[in-house]
Image (tube, grey):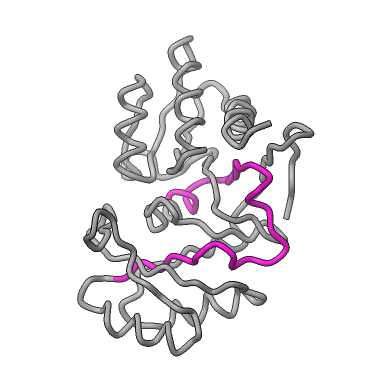
Amino acid sequence: MTQDEAKLAVAWRAVELVDEGMAVGLGTGTTATMFIRALGERVKAGLRIRCVASSDASHQLAASLGIPVVSLAELPELDVYIDGADEVGPRLALIKGGGGALLREKIVASAARKFVVVADSTKVVETLGRYPLPVEVIQMALPIVQRKLANLGLNPAVRRRDGAAYLTDEGNFILDCACEQIPDPEKIAAEIRGIAGVVEHGLFLNMASVALIAGDGGVQELYP
């Protein structure tokens, strides 16, 4: 099974969790995009749901497929949030934000009664940190936050796209931290959040309810 085949398999498994009348949070990224497209097929077949998207890109994709998308102001409580992850560690500790939507992803996830992670088996790790940890920062605070993250040994670098600093949907910068290993995610999360100017970080701790992981043996379920 290729990585794309695994992502598609887990996306369709996640669609099976969505029932008539549900309020659904839509994630961001490649696997979440496959889920949204699969969900669009069910909506086209008659499934009635309402959704909240975690990024402008996911909102636009869902709307183009005929999926009803509203704001959190209209739908503040969600039945389920379905999204991918850049890394899935022990007890379903996650690194997210490779797609640049970590702030909105965390907000939408916090509104859901159940957070379902969809990923392929390459994303499962014994220790978080191989994937760079994103930290979203307001523009004014960039030099201060970058220095303080460096002092913590996190090796931050400004995310760039097409030669320019990448901006999130909220107009913030992202610092990608090459941590290599994060043996104590709770400690690192607290240290990062204690820095003035940090909007959010990509450590999603004690949030995921279940992870659907696709590999050569099919789709398995992991729990905290």
- Towards the viewer: 156 or 113: 156
Residue in the picture at 68% in, 53% down: 124
Q: Is residue 21 left or right of residue 212?
A: left
User: Vertically, is 87 above or below 28?
Assistant: below
The image quadrant that residue 51 belongs to is: top left
- Towards the viewer: 9 or 180: 180
Query: Residue 125 placed where, x, y %?
Result: 69, 58
The image quadrant that residue 151 belongs to is: bottom left
Query: Residue 191 placed where, x, y %?
Result: 49, 82
Task: Check the image and name the residue furthest to the bottom.
Answer: 151
Query: Residue 206 placed where, x, y %?
Result: 62, 61
Query: Residue 41 placed where, x, y %?
Result: 47, 16
Quarter of the N terminus within the rendering: top right
Residue 128 belongs to the span the image colors magenta: yes
Residue in the picture at 49% in, 50% down: 109
What residue range appears in magenta? 108-137
- Towards the viewer: 153 or 38: 153
Residue in the picture at 24% in, 54% down: 162
Residue in the picture at 44% in, 67% down: 201
The image quadrant that residue 60 belongs to is: top left
Residue 36 belongs to the span the image colors magenta: no
Task: Check the image and name the residue furthest to the top.
Answer: 45
Task: Check the image and name the residue furthest to the front.
Answer: 163
